[in-house]
Amino acid sequence: MPKHLLFVFLLFSGILWSQTKIIVMDGFMEDQPLQDVYVLNQDNQELGKTNSKGLFVVPTGVNLVKLNYDGYEEKKLYVYGKDMVVQLKPITIQLSSTEITNDDSEARNIIRKSIQNQKKNSIENLKTYQYKSYSKFLVTAATDSMPYILFPKNESDSSYNDVRRLLDKSHLMLGERAMDHKFSNQFGAKNIVKATRISGTKIPLYEFVAMQPISHSFSDDKINFFFRQFVNPVSLAGLNEYRFRISDYEELEGKEMIIVSFFPQKRVQNKQQIKGKVWIDKETFALGKFYAENLSDKNVAELEMDWTLFDNYWFPQQQRYRMDGGEISYPTSKDTILADGTLRIDTIQKKEKVWLHLTTSFKDILSPVEFERNEFKGYTNEIDIKSMDQSDETLEAYRDSILTEMEKNTYIAIDSIGEKYKMDRNIRLLRVLSSGGKLSLGNYDLDLTKLFHYNDYEGFRLGVGGGTNYKFNENIYFNGYAAYGFKDKEFKFGGGIDWLVNKPYSGKIFAEYAKDVEASGRNPILLQNNYIQYLNDNFTNIYNDYFYKYQRASFGYQQDFWQNFTFRIAGIYHEKKAGFTYQYQDNRLDETYLSFDTQLALRWAPKDQNVRTPYGKVTISSGMPVFYLALTQGVNLFNADYTPTKLDFTYLDLYRTFFGQTNFQFRAGASFGDTPIFNLYEGMGNSKGKDRIFKNFGVAGLNNFETMEPGEFYSDRYLMFHVAHKFAGFRFLNQEVFPEFIYRGLIGDLENTIDHQHISFKTPKNYYQEAGLELNQLIYGILGVGAYYRFGSYSQDTFDQNFFVKATLKLTFF
């Protein structure tokens, strides 16, 4: 055979018998690979399916394949060894005599009509209704491919065998919840937890049982995917976030439904996104079914929701959620035949996925219903304590079906494991955090925030504090504390009583007395969480020695209005004396100043959801923004030396954008009338004021000005704001680091500065500024480092005086 013919033959054979790689892409969502596309040969025999990247390797010798995917046109390909990328086009759908192709305008119009008709289709148009729900939470793993380790070599192998043995008879975790739901267009909504049970613990988890990890309503811009929020495709925000396609018709309960697929307009790296389908009633444009899954190869999450027709409205029927909950690793053998023909056996680690399942069913719908106003008292979320004491009987009445033997065994097995590893004790420790630092000990609560404080005036301060709880008395609570400062060498103490008079709204009459010290000009944000107040007391005053001594007696009333609005009204008698050298007007240096104030404090947190527990109100869902307002008016009673008027405002917010996360704090205040300096507004400085960088090294405060000295600035009216922007992270020493840019500003003024003598300070008339960069939580998830620079009108003469490096501590769990 001539050489050139031989070459052509060999070349043609190589092409004919080589393998071809095909990548199949979505012809509608152009940047998205199609997974699970069926690949058939010319005899319609299945060769396999594409993987998560849309890839399929055509076997040797096959030169014709057919690509088949539900809802897409079939495609034939001739393959001769050359890799290729192909697109499958959606099947054309006829709707109202209009042809729908890759253009999503018609599908988008269907979504828009569904949004426009949401109020018309809302079940709240029923005026009144009630229903029950039953939720089951399950964590499990398939054991089919998980063999026992016959000869365990170490503790890890033995632990794996223990888990494998457990999975033969039970799941890894099981939880149940039964609830009643009521709605009245006159009185509002009420969700009542009737019973709950969680394997591994006997303590009722009041903090979690009323939480709603998955959205039941699809009328908001965001929907919850197990505490993660995604843009709702059937919303105005969804019209900007997703592309849409009419993919099919289907009949549900005698109604013709239009199935609309959705997919993100643009894939964003490292951003959690979802794709899926919505079933929309062709006649009313109401939502009748929903399916979504996250776009991640590593973390699988799927949500499916069904509605059912009730009185011509689509009512929630069932919700199913499945999520990848991690992996179980186990060793196994791999055989390898070496070049010399010998067999080598290697030990490798294989992994089996752990799955989290959450199913909720809605039933026993009733409408109309005659309700009484008192059925809706208090917070939207409520716990029926009496019913919770009989959880087993209540759950049995709410279940869709009896528990399987494996589920029954889960309670038995996991409860014994929880008892062995003292799970109840760990839950009590978690409750310390959620309660703001209170540790329950029988009839009493120990307040852990009273144990330790530090500031430059008292030095190390040790104390003890606590009070009675609901086990002592359900309506009356006593509290008290005592402390000693090792630098000022003085004892402090205080106590009080709370009388609950309106439990559904946490209403209480209170009376308090304290003899203590407080930082001059640093006005605490009233109605803040007890734990946050503790952090403020410690981290904002590390280098501050400007304190005043006081005796204070107060009484008043505090209550929540609605779900997230708290007010407090009080009368407060004060005796104050400066703990530093200071003279006000023509008074003595050691003068004790008397005052009596009436005070109104308000807190509004629009996104807070609370539930009443036996040991008090617990916030089960929170978010920004939060607003605080306090009005204080001095009254000429009890020989008061001054009667100023004082107004304080605080606004806290958090913004998440493509560029990162921004925390924002704005504070403003004004004081009118004569009053000593410790009732004014100090600049919140936290520097040592040294002339060398390393001499200034210390610990950063909590929203302090890190380049300003304590007591450096005072005002009787001021504006202050803090901005902290967290950028996308990067890897450093095998850890994700998120740089945080800091900017702070302060402007204020002070009348009659000459009234305040024997103390040196400035007023921030010309706008004080500082900027910084923090790398937080580098060590143990708590310790980090920050650098800050003072600039603008109040910058110092040298770089060393303006530049500060400090350690940062992040302990804000709330």
Image (cartoon, helix red, strand yellow):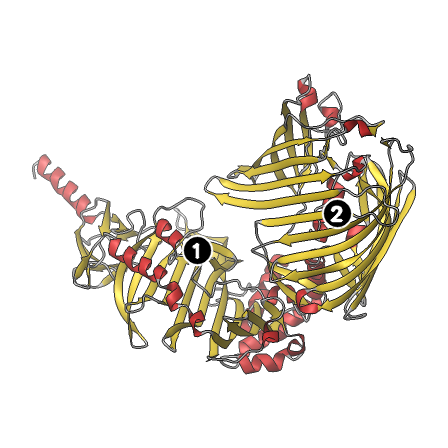
Residue 518 appears at what percent x and percent y? 81, 42
Which of 807/357 is in front? 807
Residue bearing the label numbered 2: 633
Q: Amino acid at mark 1?
A: Asp
Q: Nearer the viewer, mark 2 or mark 1?
A: 2
Residue 752, image quadrant:
top right
Determine whether 257 is above or below 241 in the image. below
Which of 493/322 is in front? 493
Residue at (20, 49) in percent of width and height: 17
> Are circles 2 and 1 on residues that touch, CB within 8 Å?
no
Q: Secondary structure at mark 1?
A: loop
Residue bearing the label numbered 1: 221
Residue 580 appears at what percent x and percent y? 86, 33
Question: Is residue 245 visible to us here?
Answer: no
Residue 389, image quadrant:
bottom right
Residue at (69, 64) in percent of width and height: 506
Determine whether 80 is above or below 684 in the image. below
Q: Quick one: which residue is furthest to the left in this view? A: 2
Residue 753 appears at what percent x and percent y? 77, 28
Question: Is residue 258 visible to us here?
Answer: yes
Quadrant (top left/top right/bottom left/bottom right) for the N terminus: top left
Q: CA distance from mark 2 to mark 1?
A: 42 Å
Q: Is residue 387 left or right of residue 66?
A: right
Q: Is residue 3 left or right of residue 610?
A: left
Q: Quick one: which residue is furthest to the top in this view? A: 797
Q: Amino acid at mark 2?
A: Gln
Q: Secondary structure at mark 2?
A: strand
Residue 736, image quadrant:
top right
**Crowding near the residue tagged with mark 2, few <14, some 14–19, many ≥20 C-alpha atoms within 10 Å:** some
Residue at (37, 58) in percent of width and height: 234
Residue 533 appears at what percent x and percent y? 72, 48
